[in-house]
């Protein structure tokens, strides 16, 4: 559908308005829609009628950005662009949408840009969000009205379409609710081994997890704005929950204790002592209401960055240390009740598996498009009925 293109300016990405004191404030980048009725009406009016043009706009922006982003970071964690660069691509698209002009776009893409701008001028929400996608991935995407828009849909499987647009309530995209929820996804998605932070008790209320990645390198997690806000909003209860688990293995505790030796960090004498101190810190920091004081957030982020840098240096200087993951089983897939190691599958089998995953994603996308069009049709039917004159006793009455 071609839409008349009026004068356009850069898209302004802003936080949504919050109407109604009964609404829980949004956490940073939380995938949740405030004012769903208002956003649904704006989405139906401005975006759903031009879904192909909106997709064309976002694809055009990706085409502009891909060569630039690939030059800046041709690989990430050993994988070629765009693999693993979901956040980088989303942030770049968000930035480019502020400045892109219709003259640099095709007519269809320019129409999508103008529709997006009109939607925002009318009060439509456009937010970058992060969370759990379908119980499988951590995902960076956008919540645009009542739509889920992923502009980096090809960063796990490169053969998938670059842009995916779905009704938000059908995307299976939900907030990370707790550190246990986070750990569940991290274990399967990142293939990390995860333990409670019984090594650095003072930071445990904010960062209660220690990850061991596939190379055996330890990391203190998770000092991101969302995860910090999540546990602080619940007065450190999610942190306290995972810190109650059994003490971390003694060998790992000693390894981390040795890695941090001489770095200025206070480490307990044993994992059990660290467990008790970490739980005590949760109680004390809650009593002091540190979860309500925003000054601690940048302090925690800076400390965690410093600790992780020190752990990385220690790991690189001692590559012969035992890797806690060396005995970890390979990921498997069950086909006809037989388990197969994914890493040992022949290349043609891996290719067929990727094709199946791609087709499944396409089916979801097409089904979502049908649902979106049905939503738009229902909105137009309601608007038509509201615009019709009222017939009373055979007489037609025009409403003011």
Image: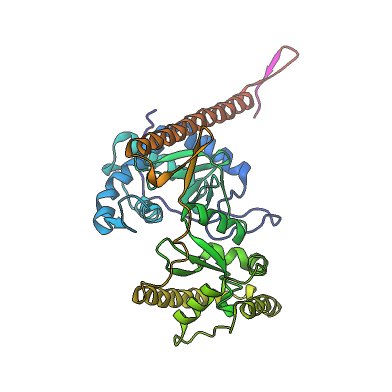
Residue 170 image offset from top left, x and y in percent: 56, 38
Residue 200 image offset from top left, x and y in percent: 55, 78
Compare residues 272 and 362 and report the one nearer the observer. 272
Residue 27 image offset from top left, x and y in percent: 58, 60
Quarter of the rendering occupied by the C terminus: top right
- 46 w.r.t. 79: above or below: above
Identity of the residue furthest to the right in this view: 393
Quarter of the rendering occupied by the N terminus: top left
Quarter of the rendering containing residue 176: bottom right
**In the shown orientation, is residue 393 left or right of residue 27?**
right
Compare residues 344 and 106 and report the one nearer the observer. 344
The magenta stretch spans residue 238: no
Please report the residue visible at 47 percent of the width from the left and 69 percent of the height from the top. Answer: 219
Dominant SS type (magenta): strand
Give the residues drawn in magenta, as a range. 395-399
Instruction: Specify the color scheme.
Output: rainbow
- 375 w.r.t. 91: above or below: above
Residue 248 image offset from top left, x and y in percent: 58, 71
Count the marks: how many? 0
**In the shown orientation, is residue 89 left or right of residue 167?**
left
Say if residue 22 shows up in the picture.
yes
Compare residues 397 and 60 and report the one nearer the observer. 60
- 379 w.r.t. 323: above or below: above
Say if residue 121 shows up in the picture.
no
Please report the residue visible at 64 percent of the width from the left and 53 percent of the height from the top. Answer: 19
């Amino acid at each position: 559908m071609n839409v008349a293109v009026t004068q356009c300016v850069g898209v302004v990405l802003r936080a949504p308005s919050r109407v109604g004191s009964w609404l829980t404030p949004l956490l940073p980048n939380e995938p949740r829609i405030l004012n769903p009725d208002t956003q649904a009406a704006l989405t139906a009016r401005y975006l759903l009628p031009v879904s192909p043009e909106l997709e064309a706009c976002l694809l055009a922006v990706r085409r502009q950005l891909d060569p630039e982003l690939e030059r800046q970071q041709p690989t990430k964690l050993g994988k070629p662009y765009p693999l693993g660069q979901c956040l980088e691509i989303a942030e770049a698209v968000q930035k480019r949408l502020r400045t892109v002009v219709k003259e640099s776009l095709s007519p269809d893409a320019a129409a999508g840009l103008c529709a997006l701008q009109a939607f925002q001028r009318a009060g439509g929400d456009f937010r970058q969000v992060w969370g759990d996608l379908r119980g499988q991935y951590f995902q960076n995407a956008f919540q645009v009205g009542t739509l889920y828009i992923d502009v980096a849909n090809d960063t796990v499987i490169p053969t998938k379409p670059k842009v995916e647009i779905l009704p938000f309530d059908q995307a299976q995209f939900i907030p990370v609710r707790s550190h246990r929820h986070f750990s569940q996804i991290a274990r399967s998605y990142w293939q990390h081994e995860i333990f409670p932070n019984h090594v650095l008790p003072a930071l445990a209320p904010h960062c209660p997890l220690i990850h061991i990645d596939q190379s055996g390198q330890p990391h203190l997690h998770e000092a991101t704005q969302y995860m910090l806000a999540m546990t602080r909003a619940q007065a450190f209860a999610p942190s306290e929950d995972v810190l109650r688990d059994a003490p971390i293995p003694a060998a790992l505790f000693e390894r981390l204790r040795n890695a941090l030796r001489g770095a200025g960090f206070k480490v307990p004498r044993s994992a059990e002592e660290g467990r008790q101190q970490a739980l005590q810190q949760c109680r004390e920091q809650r009593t002091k209401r540190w979860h309500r004081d925003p000054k601690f957030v940048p302090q925690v982020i800076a400390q965690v960055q410093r600790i992780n840098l020190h752990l990385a240096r220690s790991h690189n200087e001692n590559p012969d240390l035992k890797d806690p993951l060396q005995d970890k089983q390979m990921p498997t897939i069950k086909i006809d009740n037989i388990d197969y190691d994914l890493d040992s599958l022949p290349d043609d089998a891996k290719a067929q598996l990727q094709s199946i995953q791609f087709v499944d994603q396409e089916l979801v996308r097409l089904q979502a498009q049908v649902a979106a069009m049905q939503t738009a049709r229902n909105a137009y039917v309601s608007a038509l009925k509201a615009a019709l004159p009222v017939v009373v006793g055979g007489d037609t009455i025009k409403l003011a």
